[in-house]
Amino acid sequence: MKVAIGLYSKHEVWRLPEEPLRFLGEEFPEVTFVSTDSEEEFGRELENAEAALCWAVTPEQLKRAKNLRWVHTAAAGVGRNLFPEMVASEVVLTNSSGVHAVPIAEHVIGLLLSLSRKLHVAMTHQAERKWREESILSPGSLPGEVFDKTIGIIGLGAIGRAVAERAKALGMQVVGIRRNWRKLEYFVDQILPPEQLDTLLSQSDVVVVACPLTEETKGLIGEAQLKKMKPTAFLINIARGKIIDQKALIRALKEGWIGGAGLDVFEEEPLPEASELWGLPNVVITPHVAGATPYYWTRVTNLFADNLRRFLSGQPLVNVVDKKAGY
C-alpha cells in the first residue's frame, strides 16, 4: 500500500517534520510513505496511491488518482476538500478534529482574560514605555472578572468542549449550542439547539465562536445577532472569519453594541493593513495562530496512525467527515 503525503507549506511549522515520518515508517513497514514538497509532486505521487495524508486534494489531483480510497487532512476544517467531485466520490475523508483542542481552548481563555483584565491596554503602554494606570483604572470601566459570568459557546465539538471545561474551572456558567446533543457534560450547564442562538447571545457575557464554517454558519453572526448581545459582552472567534459579518462587527465595536472582541480569524487573511479592526482599542488580534503548539504533529501523526491501522484491518475509521454536511 502507498500513502502520498502532501504536507507542504510556506511556513515551516506547518510542514511535516522528519521524526513523525520516521515514526510512521517504523510503525507500518508494509506501507510505502512518499512525502512531497509541492502541489505538482504530490499530484504525481497521488496517482497510484491508495491513501493520502495532506492539507487538501485538488479536483485535478482527485481526477487522476484512480486508486485513491481515503484522504486524511491534517487540519480540522475541511472546506478546501469539499469540492463537488470529492463530495460525490466514494473516497472517505477524515480530518484532524481534536488535535487543536488544547492550544485553541487555552488561546480562548487568554483572549478572554486579556479583554477582561485589560492586559492588551497595559501591553500597549508597555511598548510605549508609559505608566498610564488611569487608562486602566478609569471610573465605571475597571478591569473585570470572569468568575460567575456566563460564557456561551457556539459549537460544542472538541474545541468547544475544551473551552467549556476550562471556563467552568474559572467559575463561569457555561451555555453551549450543538446539534444532536444527547449527554450533558459536567462542565456544561445548559445546551441549546441552533434555533436558540438568540437566547445564547442575549444571556452570555462572553460568546465564543467554535463551530465549523458551512453554508449554514456562513454569516451566522451579523448585525441582528450582534444587537442581541449585552453591551458589555465580549465576542471571541477562533473558528473561521466568514462566520461573522466583519463590517457589522466593526460597527458594533465602534458604536458600543458589544464590549470588545478577541479575533484569531478574519474574512480576509492576512488582515489588510487598512482594516479598522487594527486601531480599535477594544479588540485583541492574533494572526490565525490559535492552533499552534509544539505537540501538533505528534497528535496528528498518532491520530493518522490509529486510522491507518483501522484502514488496513478493515475497521471503521474515526473522524469521518460527512461530506454533504461539511464537517
Image (cartoon, grey):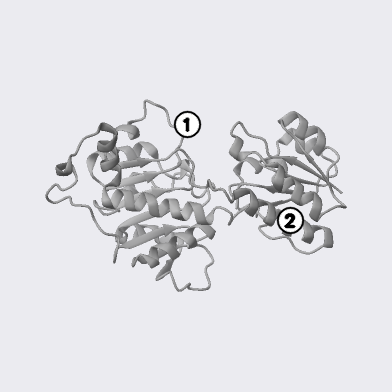
Q: Amino acid at mark 1?
A: Pro
* Distance from the alpha carbon under mark 1 to that under mark 2: 33 Å
Which of these two is toward me, 183 or 238?
A: 238
Q: Earlier in the sequence, mark 1 or mark 2?
A: 1
Residue lying at the far top of the rendered structure: 274
Residue 315 x/y as whole percent:
79, 64
Tag 2 secondary structure: helix
Can see residue 34? Answer: yes
Q: Which mark is residue 9?
A: none
* Left-right relation of 85 to 199: right
* Left-right relation of 79 to 21: left
Q: Which mark is residue 270?
A: 1
Q: Amino acid at mark 2?
A: Ala
* Left-right relation of 299 to 178: right
- The residue that appears at 77% across and 31% down in the rendered structure is 41
Which residue position is annotated with label 2? 305
Residue 194 x/y as whole percent:
45, 60
Discs 1/2, front: 2
Which of these two is toward me, 167 or 320?
A: 167
